[in-house]
Amino acid sequence: MTAKPKFTFKNYLKEVKKCWILLVVALVIGAGAGAAYSFSRPTNYGTSAKLSVFNYEVNTGSATSPYSQIGDLLMSKELNEGDLSSYEVVEKPFGVFEITVTAESEEKAISTANSVMENADKAINVAFGEDAKNYKVTVLKRASEASQVLTMKSRIISTAIIVVGLLALALIAIFIKFDYSAEK
C-alpha cells in the first residue's frame, strides 16, 4: 500500500509544473475574453460646464448662495426635455454649479451639458416664481469639447482582471486535482 504524500507547497508546485499547459490555456482564453469584453463596450464621452447663481437681494444688496432646490431642478428630466444622457449637477461653494455629462458621442455630451446650463433660468423661474427676478445666472464655462471616458488604461485593467481571475481558477483546479494517493 502506498502512502499519501503530505500536501506541501513544494509538492503543489511540482503539480503546477506538470499542468503548465492548463495555465497557458487559461492565460490565452483570459486575454481573449478580457480584450473582447473591454473592446466591445461602447466608448463614452464626458464633458462639463459651470455656471454660478446668485441672489442679489434688493434690500441688502448682498449675494447669498442659491438653494439646493436649483440643483435638483437642473437634474429634472422634464426641464431638460427628456434627455436620457447621464449627467449630474453638483453645487460647489459660492453658488457655482458644475454639470458633468457622459454620453455616447462627443456632440451629445456637449449639447446636453450646454442645454442643462441654459435651462438654469427656467429652473429658477420654476423654483422661485416671482422672486426669480432676484437671481442672476452667470455662465462660467461652456462645454466645448468632450473626451473619452473609457480609455485604453481602463480597457487594459479590465482585461488584466479577467486574466488574473482565470489563472486563479486554473490554479484552484490544479489544487483540487492534486493526487493525494500516489507518492511524489
Image: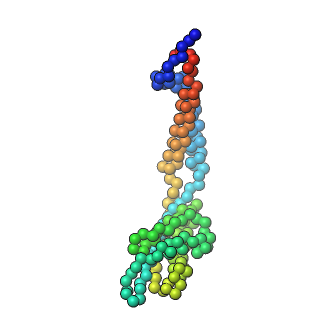
Residue that protrudes farthest toward the right in the picture = 82
* Residue under the point 53% across and 35% down: 168
Counting every numbered tag in the picture gives 0
Q: Going 55% across and 80% down the picture, which residue do you hit? A: 126
Tell me the colour scheme of the image.
rainbow
Residue 164 image point, x, y percent: 52, 38
Rendered view: 36 above or below 79: above
Can residue 140 be seen? no
Q: Residue furthest top?
A: 1
Query: Position of 82 compared to 159: left or right?
Result: right
- Tell which residue pokes out farthest to the bottom in this image: 59
The residue closer to the viewer here, 113 or 173, is: 173
The x, y position of residue 53, in whole percent, is 45, 77
Image coordinates for residue 116, horizontal then vertical, percent = 53, 72
Query: Quick check: 8 left or right of 44?
Result: left
The residue located at (39%, 89%) in the rendering is 59
Between 81 and 7, the one lying in front of the other is: 7
Name the spot of residue 32 as percent of width and height, x first: 58, 40
Seen at 39% across and 74% down, the residue is: 94
Quadrant of the rendered image containing residue 109 = bottom right
Q: Nearer the viewer, residue 105 or 56?
A: 56
Query: Would residue 103 be visible to someone looking at this image?
Result: yes
> Which quadrant would the N terminus be assigned to in this image?
top right
The image shows residue 164, relative to residue 174, as above or below, that is below
> Does residue 68 lie above or below 169 as drawn?
below
